[in-house]
Image (tube, helix red, strand yellow):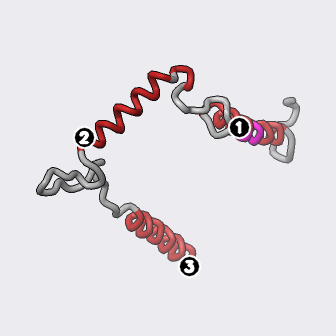
Amino acid sequence: MTKTILFASVLAVIAFGSMGMTGVAYAQYMGNVGDEGQTGKYTLEEALEIQRRRIEAVQENPASGSGTPYLDASGVIGASAISAAVFGGIAGALFIRGRSGKYAAQGRG
């Protein structure tokens, strides 16, 4: 009975896992090229103009940074500190709990 349930659950996990990743990945593109040179959303010249404006905005405001909030809770260091505190707290609690109890070695600590 238990082997049947275990086999069925493993089979279900494999089946659902294989069905979840059936999407096809496409590279980024601007759209289909039309007869008059259209490239989907906007033309190549419009795309180049937008990129040129972005570069000019960055060059005019060098102190604005990259936009990545490092010390924010949603940033790199903030998220790392929060996850380190959570997982460190769990590890510390398990370590302290493991040093005492029914199966701890007698006479050590």
Majority secondary structure in the magenta region: helix
Type of amino acid at the residue the image marks with label 3: Met
In the image, residue 29 lies in the stretch drawn in magenta: no
Q: Nearer the viewer, mark 2 or mark 3?
A: 2
* Residue 61, above or below 43: above
Residue 68 pos. (x, y %): 56, 32
Q: At 39% from the left edge and 28% from the top edge, which residue is drawn?
A: 55
Type of amino acid at the residue the image marks with label 2: Glu
Type of amino acid at the residue the image marks with label 1: Ile
Q: Quadrant of the N terminus?
A: bottom right
* Residue 1, above or below 79: below
Q: Residue 64 sits in which quadrant?
A: top right
Q: Which residue is mark 1?
A: 82
Q: Residues within 10 Å of mark 2 (few under 14, many from 20)?
A: few
Q: Residues within 10 Å of mark 3 (few under 14, many from 20)?
A: few
Q: At 68% from the left edge and 38% from the top edge, which residue is drawn?
A: 73
Q: Is residue 104 left or right of residue 76?
A: right
Mark on residue 45? 2
Q: Which residues are magenta?
A: 86-91
Q: Is residue 28 left or right of residue 12?
A: left
Q: Say what secondary structure mark 1 lies in.
A: helix
Foreground pick, 57 / 81: 57
Q: At 86% from the left edge and 40% from the top edge, which residue is drawn?
A: 100
Q: Residue 35 sits in which quadrant?
A: bottom left
| Circle nearer the N terminus (3, 1) | 3
Q: Which residue is mark 3?
A: 1
